[in-house]
Structure formats: structure tokens, C-alpha cells
Amino acid sequence: MSQVTEVKQRISEAYKENCTNSDVAPNKALLRFLEEPEAEKETFNLIFRGNHKLNFSSRLSDEDVILLCAAAEPYAQYISHVDFSYNLISDTGINSLARLLSMIPNLESINLQGNQIEIDGAKVLAEHIKDKTSVEYINLNLNNIQTDGVLQIVLVLFNNKALRELHLADNKIDHDGISGIMSVLGWHNNTLEVLNVDNANYSSIGQEIAIHIAKMLQTNRGLEKLSLRKHALNSEGLYTITEHLLDNNKLRVLDLSCNKLTYKGCEHLGKFMLSDNCVLESLNLANNRTGHYGAKAMALALSKNKTLMHLDMTTNDIDDDGLRMLGQSLYENETLVSLKLYWNHFGQNSLRVFHDLRYNTKNAEYQTQYYLDFDTYEVDGELQMCHVENHIPYDIKVDRPYYVDE
């Protein structure tokens, strides 16, 4: 029996004893995890994801977490990663969990996505982990920590120069919370590489926050991936951001999907894409309002850009002629390999361009492997299309593939 397996069994026995003393029925799915043998190694990962098919009906309650953490505290040195995503943990349970986290000497990641953590819970968590300089990954998406909570989490960025990835999406964070995050990244932290602050909760128009995002991007030299989905951002706000991005040579992945961008936003992005400092590799503009002229602006930028590998413009009300121009730009572009355009208004002209690009032997010199989200085929002399899931085998999403397996 490996040492880690023995440690897990000790935690299991202590957990069952705690349940008996508290007159609580043990969580059988949790016991199953604790009693699974581990390979010979020095540490193990405390992982119980509530959205797993075996755990879905046995999600961790506050009571489960309190009793488990009490059992695990004497063995904190053996834990590396903690993932209790998609459970039922509220501010009541977070106190015990935060105390356990503070005892883990080499804690590397914390995933509490999809729980019920609110402001007080976020404050307790931040207080216990602010000095944990080994933590590289924190995910608090889909909770309710709001601005007061997130401002406490931001304190971690002051002390922790090992943190590489921070997810705070869907937490009802308002203008002050977003500006606080941007201020820290602009002036105090150049080591965070990935930031997700999707779906902010502005009571005023979202453009007011654009200047804070812009100034951060102008001075920050660490952030490589930024997700700003659902910020109600319009083209005027994007202009402010792109003007400051002209001084940035670090950002590789930018997600602006589900905003209010028009063709003018594409013109601003095109200017940035043609700048000497641009190293952007992935741009997501899905579910905006760019239309024909937005496609024209992006086609012009693509014909000269030498860095972009992935572009998503699905659901943008682009007409047949705009799609045709995007397809023709690929004849001049040498780097783009992934293009998502489904849910626009394809006609025979645009379909012919993409069909020839991929299948016409006369254009053999251009037949690079493209990862499109559609395929074309000919029926009775007319081109048809179908949707396909076709993902580029490269890191072009904001969040990295989560590196902790069960």
C-alpha cells in the first residue's frame, strides 16, 4: 500500500468518526473517493467535482466539508490540489475549507467554481490564502462574491507572484470591482497570465470601465489571455482599449464575444492587428453586431496580419459578400488556420470561395489544413454547407485545459 493511499484511508476513517459523533450520515460518494487507492507518490489531489456523473446526486454540503476538513487537517502536507467545483458550499463551509487550505504547505490550485460562496466567504478565503505563494490557479467562477468579495481576492495578487490563472466570471462584480482588478494588474502584478472576468454587473454603461482595462493593458507585461465576455462593450469603448493595446506586445488571446461591437469595433481591432507590437493569436468576436463592414475590416486586417491563428465571428449578421471577403483574405494570409463563421448569411459566392480554398486542385498551393466550423459540398451543381465541430490542436482558448485529473 502506498503512503498516500494510507493517508487517504486515515482521512476516511476520521471523516466517518466525525460523522458518527455529529449524528450525520457520511457522504457515500465522498467515501468512495477517499477509499480509492493511489499510485506511489508523495501527494494526492483532493478532488470531488459535483458535476461528475458519480457525484451529481451526492454533492458536498457545508456539513460534509466541515467534517471532511477536520479529518484532513492533520494530513494537509500530503495535498497539492483542491477541487470542490459544482458543489453546495456556502460561507458556512468555506470557513473550514479556508483553514485547511492555509495549512497546505505546497498548495498549487484551488477550484471552487459553481458553489454558493458570497462576500463573507470570499473575505475569509482571501485572508487564509493571501500568503500562499505556491498557488498558481484560482477558479471562483459562478459564485456570488460580488465587488466587496473580489476586492479581497485581489489582495492575493499583491502577495502572490506565482499565481498564473484567475477566474472570477459570473460573480456580480460591478465597476469598482473590475477597476480594482485592473489597477492591481496595471501597477502591482506582472506575473498573472490568464484572467477571466466575464459577465460583469454594471449599473451604468459598460464603456466607463474601458479606460481602466485599457490602462492596465498599456502597462501590464504579464497577461497573455483576457476574457471580457458580456461586458456590454461597444465600439467606442473598444477604441479606447485598442489604442492602449498598441503599446502591448504580450496579449495572445482576447475574448470579446457577446458584447455590442459593430463594424467600427472591427476597424479599431484591425488597426491593432496591423501594428508592430501585435502578437495576438486568438480573437473571439462571436455574438456581436459587426455585419458586412465589420467582415470587410477584418478581411483587410487578415490579408496583412502575421500573428493571428484563430478568429471566431459566428453569429455576427455577416452577409454573403462579407463572408466572401473573409474567405478571399485567406489567400494572402499565412498564419490563420482556424476560422469560425457559422450562423451568418452564407450564399453561393462565399461558399464557392471556401469550397475552392479547400478542394479546388487549381489552388493547391493554398490548401493548408484549415479548421473551419463548417464544411461545403456540392449537390446538383449548387453548394451546400453543414456545421462541424473542428478545433485547432493548439492553445487558443482563454482558460488553459485544467491540468488536474481525477
Image: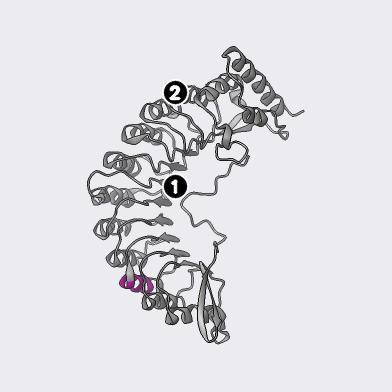
Q: Which residue: 64% across, 32% down? A: 44
Q: Which residue is mark 2?
A: 92
Name the residue located 63 percent from the left edge and 39 percent from the top edge: 406
Q: Is residue 222 magenta?
A: no
Identify the element where label 1 is drawn.
Answer: strand
Overall secondary structure of the magenta stretch? helix
Which mark identifies residue 361? none
Tell me: residue 250, above or below residue 29: below
177 lies above or below 296 = above
- Most foreground residue, 37 or 162: 37
Answer yes or no: is residue 280 visible. Answer: no
Q: Position of residue 333 (x, y in %)?
A: 45, 74
Determine which quarter of the picture holds residue 120.
top left
Q: Nearer the viewer, residue 376 or 127?
A: 376
**Residue lying farthest to the top in this orientation:** 21
User: Is residue 295 highlighted in magenta?
Assistant: yes
The percent position of residue 128, horizontal first and vertical second, equals 44, 25
Q: Is residue 47 left or right of residue 227?
A: right
Mark 2 or mark 1: name the one nearer the start of the chain: 2
Q: Determine whether, in the image, residue 373 is placed left or right of residue 249.
A: right
Disc 2, SS = helix
- Residue type, label 1: Val
Q: Nearer the viewer, residue 325 or 79?
A: 325
According to the picture, the residue beneath numbered tag 1 turns out to be 194
Q: Nearer the viewer, mark 2 or mark 1?
A: 2
Residue 265 shows up from this direction: yes
Q: Which residues are magenta?
A: 292-300
Place of residue 289 in the rendered image (x, y in percent of width and height, measured from the top left):
32, 64
